[in-house]
Image (cartoon, rainbow, N blue to C red):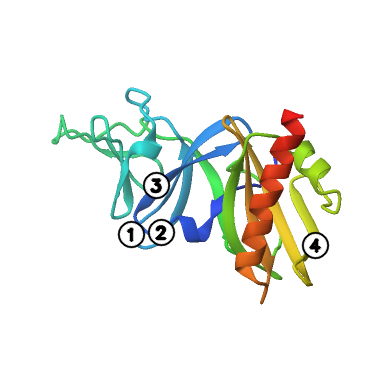
Amino acid sequence: MTPRWIATGLSQDLPKAVVMAGHWQGHDLAVWRSATGRLQAWNDRCPHRGMRLSHGFVRGETLACIYHGWVYGADGGCKHIPAHPALTPPATITVASFACVEQDGVIWVAPADMAGAPPVLSDLQPLRSISLTCDVAAVLAAEPALQGQDILRATVQIGEQGQQVCLVAQEGPAGLTLHALCGVGADKVAVSRWVEDLRRRAEMKVAA
C-alpha cells in the first residue's frame, strides 16, 4: 500500500484541548489539539498497558492516558508517571507519531517522514463528516458524476442550482467516512441534505 496523505477529520470538529480517534491505512490514531492549538497524530496505544490514548485527555500541551494517567509531551515522550512522581521517565518510553497537517479546514495524516504536501482544496469550505456502511465503489456507483478515488469532486444539480461538492474519502475499520466540502457561497443546508441522500443511495447499492 503506497503511503499517502489521508484526511482523518475536519478542523471544525477538533477544538483545542480535545482528542479524537483517527485512522491511517490500518493504523489506529489518537489525533489531538493542545491548549494552544498544536495538532498531533499518534499511535493510539499507550506504551504502558496498551490503552487507547484517544480515550485520554489533554492537559495543556500534553496528553494523558485515561488508564494510569501516564502523561506524554509534544514530542511523544513520557513526561510523568503518577504512581512514581519522583521518577524521570526513561527516554525509551515514547509514542510513535505521524505527520499531521491542517490545510483548507481538513486534518491530514501521513507517515512522519512523508514528503510533499496534502492536496489543496482552497476553493472549498468544510461542511461535515458522514459515516457510511459501504465502500468508495458504491458511492461512485450511486453518483457517477463524482470523479476520483480518494478525493471525489463534482458539480451536481441541487435544487435549481449547480453546486460544487467535494468528498474526501477515509476508509477505517468501521467502514467509510466522507469528509464533505462545498463551494464558497454554496447553500450548505441543501448540500448537506444531498450528502445524506448520497449515503442512502450508496448503501442501497450494497443492500441490493
Residue 35 badge: 1
Task: Return the residue at label 4.
Answer: 156
Disc 1 + disc 2, Cβ < 8 Å: no
> Rounded to the nearest whole Å, what is the CA distance between mark 3 and mark 2?
9 Å
Q: Is residue 138 visible?
A: yes
Eye-nearest disc, 3 or 1:
3
Q: Relative to 66, does residue 50 appear above or below in the rendering? A: above
Q: From this viewpoint, which residue is outermost toward the bottom?
A: 185
From the top left corner, tell me how far across and down residue 20 is, in percent: 43, 45
* Residue drawn at the location 37% of the way across and 59% of the way down: 16
Quick one: SS at disc 4? strand
Q: Position of residue 136 (x, y in %)?
A: 74, 39
Give the residue type at disc 4: Val
Q: Quadrant of the N terminus?
A: top right
Q: Earlier in the sequence, mark 4 or mark 2?
A: 2
Q: CA distance from mark 1 to mark 4?
A: 39 Å
User: Mark 2 — residue?
Assistant: 15
Circle 2 packing at 10 Å, graded few (<14), some (14-19), many (20+), is: few
Residue at 79% over, 37% down: 137
Three-letter amino acid code at the position of disc 2: Pro
Residue picked out by circle 3: 19
Q: CA distance from mark 4 to mark 2?
A: 31 Å
